Image (cartoon, rainbow, N blue to C red):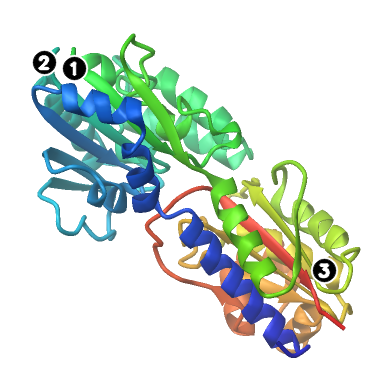
Amino acid sequence: MNGSHSSLKDFLRSLYAAALAGADPALAVTRALRLRRVERALRSARRLGVFAVGKAAGPMLEAAPAAEALTVLPEGYPPPRGKESEVLFASHPWPDRRSVAAARRALAFFRRFDKPDVILCLISGGASSLLCLPRAGLTLPGKRAAIRKLMSAGASIVEINRVRKKLSAIKGGKLGRATPARLITLVLSDVPGDDPEMVGSGPTVRRRAGDITVVVGSNRSGLAAAARAAARRGWTARLKAGRLDGEASETGRRFALEALRLPPGGVLLAGGETTVRLSERSGIGGRNLEFALGAAHALEGAGDVAILAAGSDGIDGSSRAAGAVVDGTSIARARIAGLDPEAALARHDTEPFFEMLGDLVAPGPTGTNVGDWAFAVRRRP
């Protein structure tokens, strides 16, 4: 690899691809199905059902045993390949009438199974919006307004999902309690701490004796894969202590300051999920794009460091991109192009900013969902 800025950015993009491969939902499910306790439970089933919901529902179902199946996906995501399943599409990130219909259909599906049966539940991030059934006395617009207020205030995903469970007739294990069947829940985690009760607001985690719940993949799965990829190419990778959180642009700035202390040939890897406090009139963007722009300010003038910030699901907030790559030239190039970095942040309108620079990371829906990643690299001598 030469020392140019473009080669550093290309290297970061390759680490992102490696992280995605490390968080592959189908492989994660395949490994979990080989666990002895899972194998025994599946063999004991008189009748098997499979329920998959979330951004990774398609690939997760593809790895599951053949059975009567129901899959709920975000609109625009490809249906599972090679497996028979009823497939429903619903809205994300804001639930709509399709989300309510999907929740009612899921309840009907679970009620078809009895005590000697087993339902294999494949849960990934995004399920909170895809399955939405407000509790008695609450309307869908009312629930949406409550969650939108939390998101706009910069609440974390864990805080948001706790409220979702309280407002829901299906989350917090309530879907699971609709059946006497035994449940095996395999979870691809996108939340801090990887608590299965928080992923998708835990619709099937009901804490009943005999149930099995396994977290099969997480943000750290991708980080570990990226670290291995960097090491194979002779770079020295280090995982940042703790998860990324807090306000996106400020967290990006702090991450960049840490990156500037990397030794030559060093790579810094981090994961988590930051937050953005939205204004009344927001543009097109997301937390990873704001993280990247905050990082770009701190890197200004640095000739040997580049940073990538991107979501594992391939989509960042209202943007069609997952995130962006930046280096020490990003702010100067923006000003030459007539762009105003401060205004882009203030308007939360960061996608057009990075699109003009040619620095968007836009893979489209990736089929996985384990939170966000930020990678930094310092050029080798």
Q: CA distance from mark 2 to mark 3?
A: 58 Å
Snapshot quadrant of residue 292: bottom right
Q: Which residue is mark 1?
A: 181
Quadrant where the N terminus is found in the figure: bottom right
| Element type where label 2 sits in the image | loop
- Residue at 35% of width from left, 19% of height from top? 173
The residue beneath circle 2 is: 114
- Closest to the observer, 243 or 106: 243
Residue most toward the top?
A: 209
- In the image, what residue type sits under mark 3? His
Q: In the visual, does 313 lie left or right of 251?
A: left
| Mark in front: 1 vs 3 | 1
- Of the residues under marks 2 and 3, which one precedes in the sequence? 2
* Residue behind mark 3: 297
Image position of 210 with respect to 348: above or below: above
Give the residue at x 84% y 71%: 299
Does any portion of residue 139 appear in the rendered image? no
Gap between marks 2 and 1 measured at Cα: 5 Å
Residue 24 on image: x %, y %: 42, 55
Res 304 seen here? yes
Q: Amino acid at mark 1?
A: Ala
Element assignment for label 1: loop
Secondary-structure class at tag 3: helix
Residue 85: which numbered mark, if any? none
